Every structure is written in structure tokens, then in C-alpha cells.
Image (cartoon, rainbow, N blue to C red):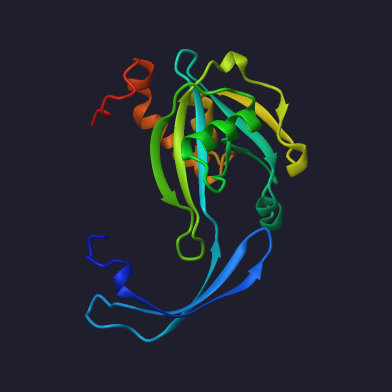
């Protein structure tokens, strides 16, 4: 339920169909929804790329004040003319029936070679709710950055992932100058900027200072 008071009961689905099914599913909906001024609007068609939940994890070493990032080829960057090898944080889809925390630990092990002992919840957000159903659950995790490095990824998923250990200040500079443009990394690093002092002080469960 949102501040408007609207919810699922305020949407009437007139027709639903799958228009594409490949690695992703694209659904088409004909629907009406309630209007802020009252009543229901006219029927509208909406296509949505349907994906389930995904996780993203920022590994952070509070002693060294370093973050563990990964670098890999991204088709989205290539298509739009950006540098296609992007600095990111470990992330991936939550498998059917898999616990979110288990997915987070699995992705960090597969993509960065690190085993996590603890996860600090950051936030959940929609990547682009006008066109995607995907919701990303972001965590931060304490690690020993001295254990990080090398090339990782699953061969059967054609992953070629290089680990990059970076001081926190350099990572934030990379956000500011456009070297880091992937949204999970940007959002997680900005959260870390707000919460870094309490994490370094060993108070991860304390509320951030204003």
C-alpha cells in the first residue's frame, strides 16, 4: 500500500499474455487503474520485462577501508557506446525457492571468490518500474580485502570477472567522475558513504547519525 492508499485491488487486468519467452520473459498487459481524481481510467497496454528478485552485495573491509568491486563485459554498455567493461558489485538473480541471503552469499563466492560471514541489509529498489518487474535487494558485507583478487565467474554462464580492490575514497571518486555507472554499485557506495563511520566503529546495527 502506498501513501495514495492504492493497491493491487485498484488495478483491473483485462488481458495478459506472453509476447516473448527467451532468457527473459516479456508480458503484455491490458489494464485499467484507479485515478487520483477518482474512478478508473481508460484501458492501457503495458509491456513489461518480467524478472524476479535479484541481489547485489558490496563487500567492504572496514579495517582497511577498502571495497571489493568486480569488472566484466556488459552488453548494455556496448550497445549504448559506453565502455563495455564496467566496474560493479557482485550481483545476480535469486533462484526459484532460494533464500535471498543464500543467493547473496552464492553470488559473491562465484563472482569474487569470497565467503561471507555476515550480511548488512541496505535497501530494496526497482531498477526501472515503468518497464521492468525486477527488484534488487542490496547488502553490504564485511570482508578481509586482503583475501580478494583474481579472475572468477562460471564458465557455463560465460562469465569472465576480474576482482578490483579499491580504497573507499577512490571508489567514491569513480562514482563522481563516471567510472562507476552501474546502479547497484552507485547506490551501495552512496549508502556506504552515509554509514561508513558506524561500520568502521564496529557498530553496524546502530542507526546512522543525522
Observer able to see residue 173: no
Q: Residue at x 46, y 13 (%)?
A: 63
Give residue 157's position: percent from left, percent from top.
73, 43
Number of marks in the rendered image: 0
Please state which of residues 80 and 164 is positioned toward the viewer in this rendering: 164
Q: Position of residue 139 (x, y in %)?
A: 45, 34
Residue 42: percent from left, percent from top: 37, 86
Going 54% across and 45% down the picture, which residue do you hit?
A: 94
Q: Which quadrant holds the N terminus?
A: bottom left
Q: Is 85 drawn above or below residue 27 in the view shown?
A: above
Residue 62 vertical position relative to residue 191 in the rendered view, above or below: above
Q: Which of the 4 quarters of the picture holds residue 202?
A: top left
Q: Is residue 203 left or right of residue 181?
A: left
Instruction: Choose between 159 and 25: the one closer to the eye.
Output: 25
> Going 52% across and 42% down the picture, which residue do you hit?
98
**In the picture shown, does residue 106 fall above or below 47?**
above
Considering depth in this image, is 148 or 105 the residue closer to the camera? Answer: 105
- Does any portion of residue 40 appear in the rendered image? yes
Corner quadrant of residue 112: top right
The residue that appears at 47% across and 18% down in the rendered structure is: 65
Above/below status of 138 relative to 49: above
Amino acid at each position: 500500500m502506498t501513501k495514495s492508499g492504492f493497491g493491487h485491488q485498484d488495478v483491473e487486468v483485462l488481458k495478459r499474455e506472453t509476447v516473448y519467452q527467451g532468457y527473459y520473459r516479456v508480458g503484455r498487459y491490458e489494464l485499467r487503474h484507479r485515478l487520483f481524481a477518482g474512478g478508473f481510467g481508460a484501458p492501457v497496454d503495458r509491456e513489461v520485462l518480467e524478472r524476479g528478485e535479484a541481489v547485489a552485495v558490496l563487500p567492504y573491509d572496514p579495517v582497511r577501508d577498502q571495497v571489493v568491486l568486480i569488472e566484466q563485459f556488459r552488453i548494455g554498455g556496448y550497445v549504448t557506446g559506453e565502455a563495455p567493461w564496467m566496474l560493479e558489485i557482485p550481483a545476480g538473480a535469486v533462484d526459484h525457492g532460494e533464500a535471498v541471503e543464500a543467493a547473496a552469499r552464492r553470488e559473491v563466492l562465484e563472482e569474487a571468490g569470497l565467503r561471507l560471514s555476515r550480511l548488512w541489509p541496505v535497501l530494496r529498489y526497482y531498477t526501472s518500474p515503468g518497464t521492468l518487474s525486477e527488484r534488487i535487494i542490496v547488502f553490504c558485507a564485511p570482508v578481509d580485502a586482503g583475501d580478494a583478487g583474481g579472475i572468477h565467474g562460471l564458465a557455463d554462464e560465460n562469465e569472465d570477472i576480474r576482482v578490483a580492490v579499491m580504497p573507499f575514497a577512490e571508489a567514491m571518486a569513480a562514482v563522481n567522475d563516471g567510472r562507476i555507472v552501474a546502479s547497484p554499485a552507485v547506490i551501495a557506495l552512496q549508502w556506504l558513504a552515509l554509514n561508513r563511520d558506524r561500520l568502521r566503529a564496529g557498530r553496524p546495527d546502530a542507526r546512522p547519525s543525522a
